[in-house]
Image (tube, helix red, strand yellow):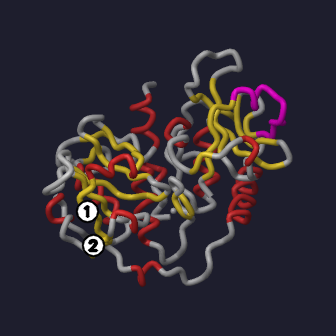
Amino acid sequence: MTKRDWVMKSTVAVMLSTSLLMGGQVGVVAAKTPDSKQSEVANIATSLIGKDYEYKAKGPKQFGSAELATYAYKQVGISIGSTISSLYKTGTKVSEKSVAPGDLVFFASSGSGSPTFMGIYIGSDQFVYSSKGEDEVVVKKYSEYSDKFVGARRVIDSSENTPSKPEKPATNIADQVIKNGEKYMGTKYKYGSSSSTTNTFDCSSFTQRVFKEAGITLPRDSRQQSAVGKSVSKSNLQKGDLIFMKASVTSSSDRITHVAIYAGDGKILHTYGSPGVTYSKYDGTNWEKRTVKIKRVI
């Protein structure tokens, strides 16, 4: 099964059931609060990473540049325009440095004038957009597009996004993620397992599921998941961090093939092979030696 086929089959179920991010952070998307529709939009946009680009396509399998934003906002009950020019006038203007998850960001290939492509800011210096050049929905570093930035718009007034109660501390969310994972202990491993089932998991459908149940939406596969969140070092590992690994200790390639959740006390919670969902020792083991990247999405 190709990466594209895998993504196309599995990301539909990931939709936050109008549930995230993904804050807290998706990229780091922020944990969803009851009134935070902008965070929901950011999380929905994140869940669409890997979908096909198609000019003027309205989703859910293919998206044009403006249509990605139209679709994401529609999922939270908000109707906006369907062209870049109309969206460039919607809502209120936001400065380049003041963008928040869910804001629409606009760019021009020439760096000035009318926008030629746009995306949705998801936090942590990242935005998601449907790229004609890459033929799919991608996540990019926002600051690297500063020379092409021409404007940003906020569709939802900040007063609509004020949480009705304080967000849970990150430590509480991490504990919830681990608790969610523990209830699946022993569940069988199956490569390419559908994200719509809990009867089997592969490594990334497992992390996607347990984070989703904690209010954080992650992309479907491990390489996509490694593109969101904040990078941290091994020395700064915290419970709930995602650990990404290559195929083997001796592999010359750092291509990511596995993801696990750091559970604290030198252990990881993940799924693989015959044990299925299980705890494994991390410190000083081959799991640690295979590590190529660590991301914090809480």
Coordinates of residue 65 in the picture (x, y in percent): 24, 50
For the residues labelled 2 and 1, the Cα–Cα distance comes to: 8 Å
Would you say residue 21 is visible in this rendering? Answer: no
- As shown in the figure, which amino acid type bears the numbered disc 2? Lys
Q: Nearer the viewer, residue 125 or 196?
A: 125
Would you say residue 16 is visible in this rendering? Answer: yes
Helix, strand or loop status at disc 1: strand
Q: Which residue is mark 1?
A: 151
Magenta span of residues: 278-290
Coordinates of residue 115 in the picture (x, y in percent): 18, 55
Q: Residue at x 43, y 25 (%)?
A: 2
From the viewer's perspective, tell me whether residue 93 is left or right of residue 281.
Answer: left
Coordinates of residue 48 in the picture (x, y in percent): 39, 48
Coordinates of residue 170 in the picture (x, y in percent): 68, 64
Reply above or below: 87 against 209.
below
Q: Which residue is mark 2?
A: 93
From the viewer's perspective, tell me whether residue 296 is left or right of residue 269.
Answer: left
Q: Residue at x 39, y 64 (%)?
A: 97
- As shown in the figure, which amino acid type bears the numbered disc 1? Gly
CB-based contact (under 8 Å), mark 2 and mark 1 = yes
